[in-house]
């Protein structure tokens, strides 16, 4: 009995039809579609004929005839083994079908996409223009700030220079004023000293003249004894009134010659009219005079 063949599955015409339609749409794939159909038919025939070749025919059974058959032993009935199913040879691996790469689909953008893209590009351009404008404005502000800083630095430098010049001029003027003041002070002091010196000299001369007149009057009134020899010197103290007139005259330091000293004292006591200074004011607050009378013969 022949082994049952596996049910044959008819090829799906829809696949072939689609392949043909696709081949029509894509002329480059026509040959690949035909090759695929031939490979499928060959593969199907190989399966069918391979299975039929593997069906085994059962071998014939021989038997002997006996006159007297021994009683049959009770033996378990032999179960006929079912024929082993024919094992189908595995089909050879099918060659891989290289599918051609599908052609890239070219998408045609719609008007809305084109408008959106144009809008985005316009916005991007506007943003870029705005960014550049902001950068230019920032650069202009920074440049203006730098120029303003330079101007302020120059102004501060000029102010410092002018201030330094003013200070130098003020110091120079102060030094000149101080020098002028010192010179004026020196001049005034020298003038005052000269006036004071001249006044003192005039005063000293007036006092010397006045004391000389007093000494001459005393000397003319003194009756010096003949036994007085040498040049004895007597010092007298003469006190004056506010108008410069003589108030009194006394011996301050005797000469050591008693006869000479007594003769001078008698002359002083005998004078009633003392000389009057030519300019009493020149004496100032001078109220006491010291004069020396030296004996001369």
Image (tube, grey):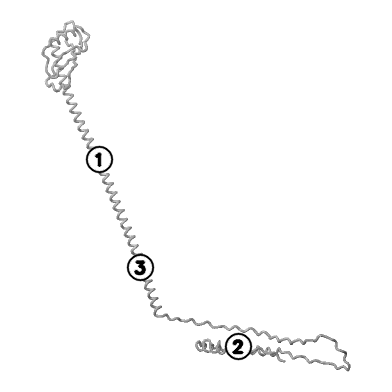
Against 246, residue 1 (above or below) is below
Tag on residue 40? 2
In-front residue for pair 280/28:
28
| Residue at 38%, 77% in the rendered image | 115
Taking the image as shown, residue 124 lies to the left or right of residue 105, namely left
Q: Position of residue 158 (x, y in %)?
A: 28, 51
Against 44, residue 250 (above or below) is above
Q: CA distance from mark 2 to mark 3?
A: 67 Å
Q: Which badge, 1 or 3, is on the more N-terminal residue?
A: 3
Q: Which badge, 2 or 3, is on the more N-terminal residue?
A: 2
Q: CA distance from mark 1 to mark 3?
A: 63 Å
- Image quadrant in which the N terminus is located: bottom right
Give the SS element for disc 3: helix
Q: Position of residue 135 (x, y in %)?
A: 36, 64
| Residue at 33%, 64% in the rendered image | 137
Tag on residue 29? none
- Contact check, label 2 and label 3, Cβ < 8 Å: no
Quick one: label 2, few (<14), some, or many (20+) residues within 10 Å? few
- Outermost residue on the right side: it is 68
Tag on residue 130? 3
Q: Which badge, 1 or 2, is on the more N-terminal residue?
A: 2
- Badge 1 is on which residue? 174
Q: CA distance from mark 1 to mark 2?
A: 125 Å
- Image quadrant in which the C terminus is located: top left
Q: Quadrant of residue 247?
A: top left
Give the SS element for disc 2: helix
Quick one: label 1, few (<14), some, or many (20+) residues within 10 Å? few
Taking the image as shown, residue 159 lies to the left or right of residue 120, namely left
Against 174, residue 60 (above or below) is below
- Contact check, label 1 and label 2, Cβ < 8 Å: no
């Amino acid at each position: 009995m022949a082994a049952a063949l596996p049910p044959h599955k008819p090829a799906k015409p829809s696949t072939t039809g689609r392949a043909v339609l696709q081949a029509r749409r894509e002329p480059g794939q026509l040959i690949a579609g035909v090759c695929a159909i031939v490979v499928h038919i060959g593969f199907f025939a190989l399966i069918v004929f391979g299975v039929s070749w593997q069906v085994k025919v059962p071998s014939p059974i021989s038997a002997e005839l006996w006159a007297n058959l021994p009683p049959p032993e009770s033996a378990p009935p032999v179960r006929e083994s079912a024929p082993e199913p024919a094992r189908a040879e595995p089909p050879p691996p099918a060659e891989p079908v290289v599918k051609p790469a599908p052609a890239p689909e070219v998408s045609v953008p719609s008007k809305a996409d084109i408008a959106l893209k144009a809008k985005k590009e316009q916005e991007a351009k506007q943003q870029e223009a705005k960014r550049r404008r902001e950068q230019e404005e920032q650069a202009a502000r920074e440049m203006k700030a730098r120029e303003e800083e330079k101007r302020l630095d120059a102004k501060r430098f000029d102010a410092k220079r002018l201030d330094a010049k003013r200070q130098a001029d003020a110091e120079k003027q102060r030094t000149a004023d101080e020098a002028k003041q010192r010179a004026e002070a020196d001049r005034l002091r020298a003038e005052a000293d000269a006036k004071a010196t001249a006044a003192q000299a005039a005063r000293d001369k007036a006092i010397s003249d006045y004391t000389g007149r007093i000494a001459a009057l005393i000397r003319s009134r003194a009756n010096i004894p003949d036994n007085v020899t040498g040049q004895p010197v007597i010092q007298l103290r003469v006190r004056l009134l506010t108008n410069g007139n003589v108030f009194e005259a006394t011996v301050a330091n005797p000469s050591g010659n008693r006869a000479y000293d007594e003769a001078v004292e008698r002359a002083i006591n005998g004078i009633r009219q003392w000389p009057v200074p030519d300019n009493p004011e020149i004496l100032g607050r001078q109220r006491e005079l010291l004069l020396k009378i030296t004996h001369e013969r």
